[in-house]
Image (cartoon, grey):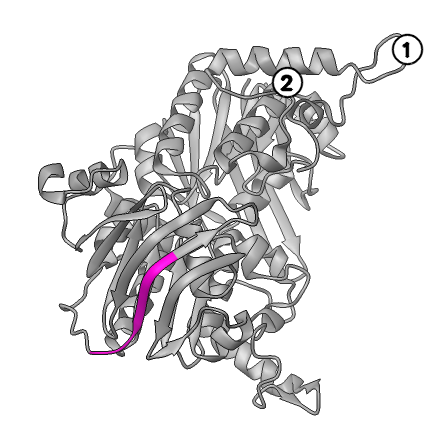
Amino acid sequence: MKLELRGITKRFGSLVANDHIDLVVEPGEIHALLGENGAGKSTLMNVLYGLYRADEGQILLDDAVQNFRGPGDAMAAGIGMVHQHFMLIPVFTVAENVMLGHEKTTGLGKLDLAQARAHVRAVADRFGFQIDPDALVGDLPVGVQQRVEIIKALSRDAKVLVFDEPTAVLTPQETDELMGIMRQLRDEGTSIVFITHKLREVREVADRITVVRLGKIVGTASPTATNAELASLMVGRAVELTVQKEPAKPSSGGLEVRDLRVLTPGGAIVVDEVSFDVRPGEILAVAGVQGNGQTELVEAIVGLAARTEGSISLDGTELVGKSVRSILDAGVGFVPEDRKEDGLVGGFSVAENLILDRTTDPAFSRAGTIRRAELDAFARARIEEYDIRTRGPETPAGTLSGGNQQKVVIAREMSRDLKLFVAAQPTRGVDVGSIEFIHKRIVETRDAGIPVIVVSTELDEVTALADRIAVMYRGRVVGIVPGDTPRETLGLMMAGATDPEVAA
């Protein structure tokens, strides 16, 4: 099915999110829509999917003008969408989620779950998915949840499939699997719109590339274009794609972790006898395939782990047993890996989110009342400093693009007096221009004499930032190696090799 957008314009008050955008996606084509966070990519696709109504312009499918009143009309016309933030009900099973909104019943008026299960199995077999139709979605890893979203879209017989930032929460292995699925769909004739800001993925899978900046199409590119050329087109300036930093100059003190164990409420060990140091003036990156204890390690450091044994000492002060509030007040800055669930309150304004952990600070509060003028001035300064694309400080944080939400979290945590900075997946879902900025700020934090821990599943990020790298596998640190350790060695360690010399 051929998709054509003509002159699509979408305004939110004075903000023009899409400015007369023209786009054509041919049948059996992967068309990448590349742009910065907040460039208007997701807004455009939400117009296509019927979630928003365009103020101007037309949508055509096989040259026929469409008038979608909602997502139901878009789905009926053959459009499916895999959203960046999954549209799934966690307490429903896979089969129940797939049939939601399109329920079929038996002759007795009961939901025909048997048919839904069979349909899930049929699509799963087609793509080699290993999915139990009766599994609760909330119990599934994010990569499997995304496959459920794909099954949902294909169950409606989608001829045009939109992937909105589909790799933002995936591991490298899951990303490679997803791109294989996209190629298979393309070869079967499905038209695919791939929204992303990850240059490697665009060059690897796209047939054509359209670049959007500040709501307008600014050019097209071939997948053979270099990363530097694509980045420049996206951002409108040359982008430094490598991290520039001087050798570390660590000093005494900092964070000392000794014999750390973290247990689940049920008693399972998820971090097992881990010990390491992070000195002021150095970056320790924690690498590993997601699910090997990195999340629980970070949660233990900031006081969020359910059961913690061992010692975590910051400048001689023991943190184990202290409350999260006490740990933050001790100077620990924390960027959680899931900004939507743990980093922000979506219904709160950008300004309120910028002081979530400082509401009792005399700079912003007096006699239990927020000092609005001071908060507004602080928020406007951070919005400018961190280039947060928002209509203003009072905009609800949940309405921002994913990358701009991440900037709010980074700005909040880096705007305090720090003795330790902990960042889990700091650039997840963030465009190249913002990655450049965030990496510079992390290095500046290190150079200011603050110990830094970065947890990332992106090996490029690990090797770019790290002075030393701790590799985790099944809850243990299998080795701590220099930051310039080859990727191949790190990959073997992430699979459990304990001797980096042997691994190399």
Residue at which label 1 appears: 108
Task: Tell me how far mark 1 sits from mark 2, CA to CA.
Answer: 24 Å
In the depicted view, which residue is nearer to us: 397 or 108? 108
- Residue at the spot x=83%, y=14% of the render? 105
Q: Amino acid at mark 2?
A: Ser
The region drawn magenta spans 252-260
- Residue at the spot x=43%, y=78% of the render? 331
Q: Tell me if I can see residue 393 in this picture.
A: no
- Residue at the spot x=58%, y=90% of the render? 362
Residue 201 falls in which quadrant of the image? top left
**Disc on the earlier residue, 1 or 2:** 1
Q: Which mark is residue 155?
A: 2
Tell me if residue 335 is in the magenta stretch: no
Q: Secondary structure at mark 1?
A: loop
Judge from the rendering whether residue 384 lies leftward or rightward of residue 224; answer left or right.
Answer: right
- The C terminus lies in quadrant: top left
Q: Amino acid at mark 1?
A: Leu
The spot of residue 133 in percent (x, y) is 62, 20
